[in-house]
Amino acid sequence: MAKALFIKPEDIIKSTFLDGSLDRDKLTQFIYLSQLKDVRGYLGQDLYDKMAADIVAGSLAGVYLALNTDYIQPFLTHSTMSMFLPFAGFTLGNGGVFKHSGSSEQIAEQSEVDALSEQHRIHSEYFGKLLVNHLCENDNDFPEYSTNEGDEIDPNKDINPTNWVL
């Protein structure tokens, strides 16, 4: 079965500071990883599977298309960037791991890359909250949101997963 991507690499490139000449394949693995780790966790297994099947079939429509366009894609843009940035300067080849350096460019310091990644994580957390709020307020539109059984992944409705409140 083909992998469903809820957002295309081109859409992330257009929405961020990524260079348009970036190899799209480098982003694809991080999009898919973000979907599996984060989006599936927010949607739950059943809603995720339904939307993934519709994307592969080219039949995503109605409230599901709006959910993807208005909530999932903004989240995925920043979640993917947060995951991608720490790896962006490296290539793994037959000779080992290589760090890129352009002739007229200066390689960013690790702390600078970490700061950029953290900003995208903060943005993805914000859009994740919007996604969960939308799903909770409109759960009648998404029956799959509450049909997970057994060992399926239930939706994570905790919209503040990383911040401690004392």
Image (cartoon, rainbow, N blue to C red):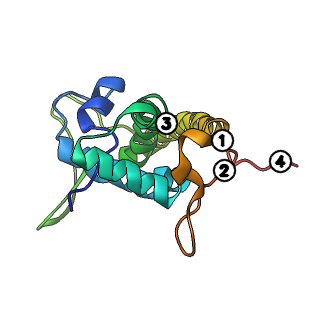
Amino acid at circle 1? Cys
For marks 1 and 2, the one nearer the N-term is 1
Task: List x then y, in percent, for residue 154.
Answer: 59, 61
Q: Is residue 107 left or right of residue 128?
A: left
So how many labels did they put on this image?
4
Taking the spot 52% from the left edge, 53% from the top edge, the residue there is 144
Find the residue positioned furthest to the bottom.
Answer: 150
Cβ atoms under marks 2 and 3 closer than 8 Å:
no
Displayed quadrant of residue 93 = bottom left
Cβ atoms under marks 4 and 3 closer than 8 Å:
no
**Where does label 2 land, which residue?**
157
The residues tagged by marks 3 and 1 sit, at their Cα atoms, a distance apart of: 24 Å
Amino acid at circle 4? Val
Q: Nearer the viewer, residue 14 or 117?
A: 14
Taking the spot 43% from the left edge, 38% from the top edge, the residue there is 64
The answer to whether 105 is drawn above or below residue 152 in the figure is above
**Where does label 4 land, which residue?**
165
The residues tagged by marks 2 and 3 sit, at their Cα atoms, a distance apart of: 21 Å
For marks 2 and 4, the one nearer the N-term is 2
Q: Secondary structure at mark 3?
A: helix
For marks 3 and 1, the one nearer the N-term is 3
**Where does label 1 land, which residue?**
136
The residues tagged by marks 2 and 4 sit, at their Cα atoms, a distance apart of: 17 Å
Circle 3: is it few (<14), some (14-19), or many (20+) Cα within 10 Å?
many
- Between circles 2 and 4, the one closer to the viewer is 2
Cβ atoms under marks 1 and 2 closer than 8 Å:
yes
Amino acid at circle 3? His
